[in-house]
Image: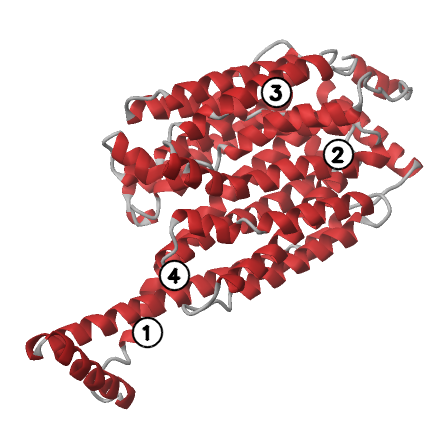
Amino acid sequence: MEALETAKSGTFESPWKPRHNVWLIAFSVMLATFMEVLDTSVATVSLPHIAGNLSATTDESTWVLTSYLISNAIILPSSGWLSNLMGRKRYQLLSVTLFTLASMWCGAATSLGMLIAARVLQGAAGGGLQPVSQAVLLESFPVHKRGQAMAVYGMGIIVSPLVGPLLGGWITDNYSWRWIFYINVPVGILALLMIHNFVEDPPYIGKNADKRIDYIGFGFLAIALTALQVVLDKGQEADWFGAIWVRWFVAVAAVAMLAFIIRELRTRSPIVNLRVLVDRNLATGTFLIGLLGIIIYGTTALLPLFLQELIGYTAYDSGMAVAPRGIGAILSMILAARLVGRVDERILITIGVLIRGTSLFMLGDLNLSMSMGSVVWPNIVNGFANGFLFVPLTTMTMKTLPNELMGAGTGLYNLLRNLGASIGISMVTTFLTRGEQAHQSFLVAHLNGTDPTYTSTLQQLTHFLAVQGGRGSGPQLAMGTLYRDLLQQAALCSYIGDFRLLGYLSLLCLPFLLFFRNKKGKQAAAAVARNRAIAARQAAR
């Protein structure tokens, strides 16, 4: 392998530079990435319409989301190997083509099974777009401008999930749910044209690619992630480990993942290069992005539920309340892009973590009589944290990783973010349900005849409702009204607890920043050379 032999000899070629303007390259790859990330959230608010149109239950329609995530997660870590084998440009062109065709298939689906099959293909095609786009940006931009490159990447990754529910709700209400998939067709065609004309492969791509395919490792990975995703998606409905099938699925996922790790570390042609984790910055950043995935996607899942279930917002109105988060994200992306390279990235990440925690504690103070502004301002603050998290975190994570290992590194990095997202959504929904039950048990203890507040409120409410609806209906209506209020208060307490828990998890990120090595100039070059040499020695075993 030529790149690794170069590492052993201690000589390195001059840095490669693309022929085209780096901003044209950035727009080309981010157009495809924006389209792919948008489809992870755009269908969320349309599930009831999809279920009704395809004669399915709402519960069955959730597989429209999970089937996409499962196939997406399986492809993510192997994207580095595939792009190195085929070439980044060819792999992107193939992925965008399949994604666009799958989007057309989704829009034309006549049954739920057909739609799920199309979503599996769509997720598999889109799985490699995020890490490969990230690798192309990092390779194309010079080292001192990689912060700007990650700001562009962060725009697509962060803004598109915020636009998704709003756009999906508007399209579904005004046209049809099918158009949330059809809109990918013109975007995909434009992305294909731009990638074909502006993106090019560095000279080292393909030179160190092993042509053999690790079918065994890929099989273990597919089994582990599929079993894990099914458990995360359906575990709460089955009472988690109370169901035998959940215990079996967890055991299968654990054994398959262990077998996958052993296989990838021992084989000479791994489909996922786990050896890149010897890079300390990459290992630390990969762990942190997983933790941040729990926090960010957990918040994204909680807030629309809170607004629709407790406050009575429609899907579109809840999207309008959440959308201002994008304003804060855009502002911070612009600011962070200017600061990265001038200010220690660890300081910027610390600022982002503290801002994120503050916004979550602000959301933990919401109540049932709040105004729209009470939701908008915490969301703007929440979005403002994103630029100080994603841009410097990605830059610091990839800082000492050799370019020829960038694809493998970004694949693992994005996989952990997706796994964190799945765990976060599952975690907050589980805690929400269990928290409601616990708070109901606590609050109902106060609904007894010895509590003067309860008896006084019941008497007044009974008298008022008896006057409104007749003497016989007063006591029953009063008890029903009080019980409904109790359920609302229990749910409110559970939501508050979840938001505050996510706030504490944000602060938990701070100690791990100490594991980063912030090297500059000759030190960074030496670290890259050392990591390249370590990878070469491991590959030669």
Whole-angstrom CA distance, mark 3 to mark 2, is: 18 Å
Crowd rating for badge 4 (residues with CA inside 10 Å; few <14, some 14–19, many 20+): some
Quick one: label 3, few (<14), some, or many (20+) residues within 10 Å?
A: many
Quick one: label 1 or label 3, which is nearer the N terminus? 3
Mark 1–mark 3 distance (CA, rounded to whole Å):
55 Å
Q: Position of residue 49 (x, y in %)?
A: 31, 37
Badges 1 and 3: C-beta atoms under 8 Å apart? Answer: no
Q: Amino acid at mark 4?
A: Ile
Labelled disc at residue 149:
2
The amino acid on which the numbered mark 3 sits, given as a three-letter code, is Ala
Q: Residue at x 27, y 75 (%)?
A: 444
What is the spatial separation of the Cα atoms under label 4 and label 2, in whole angstroms?
A: 40 Å
Secondary structure found at label 1: helix
Front residue of 56/533: it is 56
Q: Secondary structure at mark 4?
A: loop
Q: Secondary structure at mark 2?
A: helix
Q: Judge depth for marks 3 and 2 and give the one in front.
A: 3
x then y, percent, for residue 445: 27, 78
Image quadrant containing the C terminus: top right
Q: Earlier in the sequence, mark 2 or mark 1?
A: 2
In the displayed structure, 31 sits above or below 231; it is above
Q: What secondary structure is marked by label 3? A: helix
The residue that appears at 36% across and 58% down in the rendered structure is 312
- The residue where tag 3 is placed is 191
- The residue under label 1 is 442
